[in-house]
Structure formats: structure tokens, C-alpha cells
Amino acid sequence: MQNDLRLFLEQKLISDFNLDKEKVEAVICHLNKKQDCCAACGSKVLASECTECPDCGAFNYNLQEPVFNIEFCSHLEWSLDFSNTEQENTEYYVESFWCDGILQIPEDPESLLYDNIKNDKQIVTKAWIGYGGQDIYEMKIKFGRKSLGNYKKGKSIIGCIPKAGRKEKWITLDVNKRKIEIQLT
Ligand SMILES: [Zn+2]
């Protein structure tokens, strides 16, 4: 498991289950750092999400890395092309806007469940955008057919970010309301 996911889980266990930090750490020591590898002996043998290691017998939470993760958010951040946006407020010169970060933990973490994405077709998170990349925007990431299919299969959605130079506008920006919408393929 990646460190940011571990930290997120730690906070979540403390806030949602009222566990103290010591208990949370006891739970987390069973989480393997790498998908498929035993947290105790490092054997690369784990086949399912919660399972005992066939080599050493240790119990493992063998959690899948979420599809909406820090890597996807970084790719999206670098891909935002503000010279090709649909704008609600045309008085702003947004060509020189840039994005200084996209939060990989949405306001409602349950929105990351596939069933919710299937219904809502979106994830709502925060992004830092502006001339200095410092204003906080509400970012809606809308799912298309390809991204929805990949999400269902647990596959990366990085390839569903439209490529630079695409004619079709996939970024909608409302500077006054500090809102941005992204349409994935
Ligand atoms: Zn083991």
C-alpha cells in the first residue's frame, strides 16, 4: 500500500470507528505494502483481498490500490490545458492558469465505490487552480464510457484523460464560482 493511502485509512479508522491510534496501528500492521505480497514474510503469493499467507500463515489485508489515486491526480494535473476550456465567464484570461494539485481524497470517500460512480458518473474533489495555482476549486471529474469500464475492472483511468491538442473541449471552467468540470473518455 502506498503511504498516502495508509495515512488516509488511518484517519478514516480513527474518525469513523472511533479507534485510538494504537489500535489503528495494530490493524494497519496487517496491511501489506505491496498488493499480492505478504506483510509478514514478503512472499508474493496472495490471491485475494483478505487472506492468510500460504507461506507463513500471517493474515493479510491485501487491498487493491484505488483507481482514483495520487498517480491519476498527478497525471490529470499535468494534462490540464487551460488554453482549451469551455468558459462560463469569458472576462478572465485563463490561458495562463495552472493547476497546483488535485486532491486524491474526495469530500465523500464513498463516492469512490463503483456502484456510486455507476449512478453518479462523477467524483467531486478539490483542485488548486489560478494564475498562481492557488485558488481552491470544486472539481467534478465526469466519467465517460471508457473510464467507467476501466473503473469497474479496477484498471487505470489515466489513459481516459483526453490528450493535449484535442479539439473537443473537455474542461469547463467557472472562475466566479470556482468550479471546474473534467470530462474523461
Ligand atoms: Zn507470509
Image (cartoon, rainbow, N blue to C red):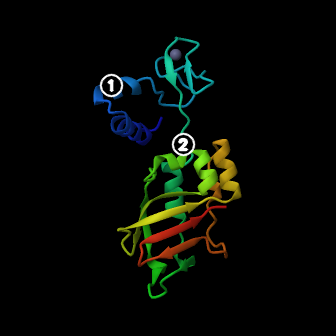
132 sits left or right of 104 in the view: left
Q: Amino acid at mark 1?
A: Lys
Q: Note whether 22 is above or below 83 in the view shown.
A: above
The answer to whether mark 1 and mark 2 are in CB contact below 8 A is no
Image mark for residue 136: none
Q: Residue furthest bottom?
A: 91
* Alpha carbon separation for disc pair 1 and 2: 24 Å
Task: Pick the residue in front: 107 or 87.
Answer: 107
Q: Note whether 46 is above or below 87 in the view shown.
A: above
For disc 1, the marked residue is: 23
Neighbourhood count class around disc 2 (C-alpha, 10 Å): few under 14, some 14–19, many 20 upward: some
Q: Amino acid at mark 2?
A: Pro
Task: Pick the residue in front: 180 or 116.
Answer: 116
Check disc 2 and report its element: helix, strand or loop: loop
Check disc 1 and report its element: helix, strand or loop: helix
Question: Which mark is nearer the camera, 1 or 2?
Answer: 1
Q: Note whether 79 is above or below 32 in the view shown.
A: below
Name the residue: 56% across, 78% down.
86
151 sits left or right of 89 in the view: right
x and y, in percent, of residue 108 in the image? 45, 51
For disc 2, the marked residue is: 66
The quarter in which the C terminus is drawn is bottom right
**Mark 1 or 2, nearer chain start:** 1
Q: Residue furthest top?
A: 56
For residue 131, which quarter of the picture? bottom left
x and y, in percent, of residue 154 in the image? 63, 42
Name the residue: 37% across, 38% down.
16
Neighbourhood count class around disc 1 (C-alpha, 10 Å): few under 14, some 14–19, many 20 upward: few
